[in-house]
Amino acid sequence: MPADLPQVLALCRQLDLPGEPALSEPQAQAQFEALTAGERHRIYVAEQQGQVVGTFALTFVGGLAHSARDSCIVEDVVVTPSLRGTGVGKKMMAFAMRECAARHCYKLVLSSHLQRDRAHRFYEGLGFRKHGFSFLIDPEAVDGAGQP
């Protein structure tokens, strides 16, 4: 997988917000090593003819609730634009679901930006359903006392 990092970075840049600084290859390498050093975070790739055409990450979150079973978060799901709609994403998510089932997770969750209607239809077509609300705050907008 480390050899795939440049291709994974190129795919992940499609998820970056406008104005977000690009991650350098050395920064990405260090982050990749830190993330994958333990058993709770995994980065996967989909390949066709030796080329990385998709990627996603799974993060397993432990706790004491739900009989101490993990929950799993899917992040950074992206497929090469020319291959969207060809089944690559569906295979990646099927793999993610099997991994979570094998680890006896009590849920598999993901978030998707409100404006990504096509992605929402994709996830709903796989059986994901809207559940609750997702909230966020920009940590840089919070002062030292924890106030926005």
Image (cartoon, rainbow, N blue to C red):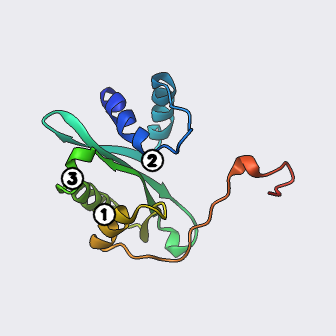
Mark 2 vs mark 1, CA separation in Å: 15 Å
Determine if residue 92 is in view. Answer: yes
First reached walking from the N terminus: tag 2 or tag 1: 2
Query: Residue 135 falls in which quadrant of the image?
Result: bottom right
Q: Amino acid at mark 1?
A: Met
- The residue located at (53%, 77%) in the rendering is 132
First reached walking from the N terminus: tag 1 or tag 3: 3
Q: Amino acid at mark 2?
A: His
**Which residue is at the front of the view, 16 or 6?**
16
CA neighbours of label 2 inside 10 A, class few (<14), some (14 to 19), many (20+): some
Query: Residue 82 falls in which quadrant of the image?
Result: top left
Q: Which residue is mark 3?
A: 88
Q: Which mark is residue 41?
A: 2
Mark 1 vs mark 3, CA separation in Å: 14 Å
Q: Which residue is mark 1?
A: 97
CA neighbours of label 3 inside 10 A, class few (<14), some (14 to 19), many (20+): many
Mark 2 vs mark 3, CA separation in Å: 21 Å
**Which residue is at the front of the view, 135 or 96?**
135
Image position of 37 with respect to 95: above or below: above
**Image location (x, y in percent) of residue 25:** 45, 24
Query: Residue 4 falls in which quadrant of the image?
Result: top left
Horizontal arrangement in the rendering, residue 35 relative to residue 87 (left or right): right
Q: Of tags 1 and 3, which is closer to the observer?
A: 3
Image position of 70 with respect to 131: above or below: above
Q: Are dots 2 and 1 in contact, CB under 8 Å?
A: no
**Which residue is at the front of the view, 14 or 76?**
14
Horizontal arrangement in the rendering, residue 141 relative to residue 22 (left or right): right
- The residue located at (40%, 43%) in the rendering is 14
